[in-house]
Image (cartoon, coloured by chain):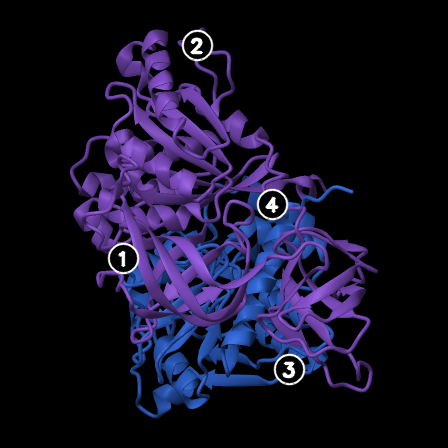
Amino acid sequence: MNYQLNHLRELESESIFVLREVAAQFENPVLMFSGGKDSILMVHLAQKAFYPARIPFPLLHVDTGHNFPETIAYRDALVERLGLRLIIASVQEAIDKGMVTEEKGYNASRNGLQTTTLLEALEKGKFDAALGGARRDEEKARAKERFFSHRDEFGQWDPKNQRPELWNLFNGRKHYGEHFRVFPISNWTELDVWQYLAMENVELPSLYFAHKRNVFERDGILLADCEYIQKKPTEEVKEMMVRCRTIGDMTCTGVWLSQASTIEEIIEEVATSRMTERGGRADDKRSETSMEDRKKTGYF
Amino acid sequence: MDFQSSELLRFTTAGSVDDGKSTLIGRILYDSKSIYQDQMEAIEASSLRRGETEVNLALLTDGLRSEREQGITIDVAYRYFSTPKRKFIIADTPGHIQYTRNMVTGASTANVALILVDARNGVVEQTRRHAIIASLLQIPHLVICINKMDLVDYDEERYEQIKSSFERFAAKLDVKDVHFIPISALRGDNVVNRSAETSWYEGPTLMYYLENVHIASDHNFIDTRFPVQYVIRPNTDQFHDYRGYAGRVAGGILKKGDKVTVLPSGFSSTIAKIDTIDGALNEAFPPQSVTILLEDDIDISRGDMIVRENNQPIIGQDLEVMVCWFNEKPLQSRGKYTILHTTKSARCMIKEIRYRLDINTLHRDLENMEIKMNDIGRIVIRTTKPLFYDAYRKNRITGSVIFVDEGTNETVGAGMII
């Protein structure tokens, strides 16, 4: 017998350990679910961590109202199949109540507005830990994120004052009103996620596979043509074979030219890609430190 | 698929900007084709904006705005790359003296430590400090990269001088496996590709070493330790009486049918099943996360430990610990802290400070014993309840603790049990 785990099984084991720590250390955790592959992976790992019991926390979807319809269909089927509780926090409601103001213009996006909605949902549900599918390889500010990330009573992240994390000892102690963001798949890369989802035969939303879609180009990024984005007169819509590498709000998720129609073809494409997956995210391109700035105020 | 056979290796790099650490990481990522086009374009643009003439590979690793402003690395940053043989996680830690705590953090989970030495300067205080930390943290493999060989004309004699100077010093340390590699991170000599300039060097390139170093025995496979993390009780009709003890194997190998003892109660039972969602396993080993079911109905909760009857950890409340301090408020002698150990927590009192270790010389300072931020010292503690522990040398999981401030809840120190 060879007592050596391959890298995917080792990452799986680490993530399961972190998920169980959350269930043990916190009273009222919640899993932030966006419908993207990383949050699908999180649900898959959570099933493993608590089998044969049900996942002991609800899912929270921060709904911008600008979703790809495929995302919502997948989400609802998953919740139904696993018998989970789903909480929807609506950005539209926050706009209607006047808590946030919608951006205007060509690059208007509700991405930044999610923070207020998220923090309100966490407060309302009295959640003391919010599990997220962020990975350190995604973005440079995330490269320094902890597994257990402490947030003050305003939900803020202070990168200079994070708790050191050693061995597998996770300190989730906090004062009343504070909460933690926990990132069990911190050490996974995009390629790891795909390889693992293939190995485990996990069903995925159709958006990840190449399909025909009406798209147009803006600042070097292909965006899906939809009612939520105001097009400039010069922007020309064309039908192309594309797929999503990340799934977020339709207004800021770029799609990629691709012929990859199976998970094996996606792995091949990711392994040879010369662009990072967030290279298509308009929300990261606003400034050199836009992720760091959003994280400080309480973004995912 | 072949990716299923690749192992995970974690390594830490310590050194300052002057040693060429960022250049080395940039070189590893660049030569292994792990830098993406948009990342490259982003750092090209940043370099230009900062008025630099060449692309500054260090910008790949310096992520936060405050770091970019100050041109230093504040915190541990994690980098990922893979080759067909292995997946790698780099814990990139800053080397300045005030960041000992980051080095300790990065070192705590590493299989390999890379220490950079500038070939012109040889072994300096910082080299010694990094080696001492690697030794204290029991990183299984140490690689001394003698860098900037191009600036000493790839001189074999210079390389040998540095090597023997380090070996003389390392004799005082507790390191099991040391390798030396002459490199030039800037020119790429012996990093990924073999150098034509060092024909006298017959060892592996750095990448070959990282891909092939034997890490399968870095875990303890002898002494069975299973700290119970969480109790799984589905309370459904189908699994009415199911009571599973979830956790990650910290040491040894657990098999179905093994006679085990549960601490602290001391009750004995037999492993009925090792459960996972993908079916039962015949055995479990570190670092697997599994669920253990026992034949007998015993009261077990988080913080308990499942062990073999004839191979038990030390059970005690008085511990000698090497502590590394992380907080601006110094370690309080006679102070009380919360202590986290495996899946257990307790309170403890600092009974005595034995000495402060000078991490540049290994000198035991008995005069100036205050343990401040980034200091390392040997202390004696007493816990409110018994811990089930091993010496850190024997098991990095059951031999490590962290200290938590009871007022602020911050992690203020890390300890290795002696």
Q: CA distance from mark 3 to mark 2?
A: 61 Å
Per the model, the C-alpha gap separating discs 2 and 1 is 43 Å
Which residue is identified by label 1?
A: A287
Mark nearer the viewer, 2 or 4: 4
Q: CA distance from mark 4 to mark 3?
A: 37 Å
| CB under 8 Å between discs 4 and 3 | no
How far apart marks 2 and 4 lie (CA) works out to 37 Å
Chain the render paints purple = B
According to the colouring, which chain is blue? Answer: A
Location of residue A47 (image quadrant):
bottom right
Q: Chain of mark 1?
A: A
Residue under label 4, please give it: B219
Secondary element at tag 3: loop
Instruction: Tell me if mark 2 has few (under 14), some (14-19) or many (20+) residues whose alpha carbon lies within 10 angstroms of its own.
Output: few
Horizontal and vertical percent position of residue A44: 65, 66
Is B39 left, or right, of A186 in this rendering? left
Quarter location, residue B276:
bottom right
Find the residue positioned furthest to the bottom.
Answer: A97
Chain for numbered disc 3: A
Question: Disc 1 or 3, which lies upstream in sequence?
Answer: 3
Residue on which disc 2 sits: B196
- Residue at image coords 35%, 50%: B76
Amino acid on which disc 1 is placed: Ser
Marks 1 and 3 sit apart, C-alpha to C-alpha, by 38 Å
Residue at which label 3 appears: A84
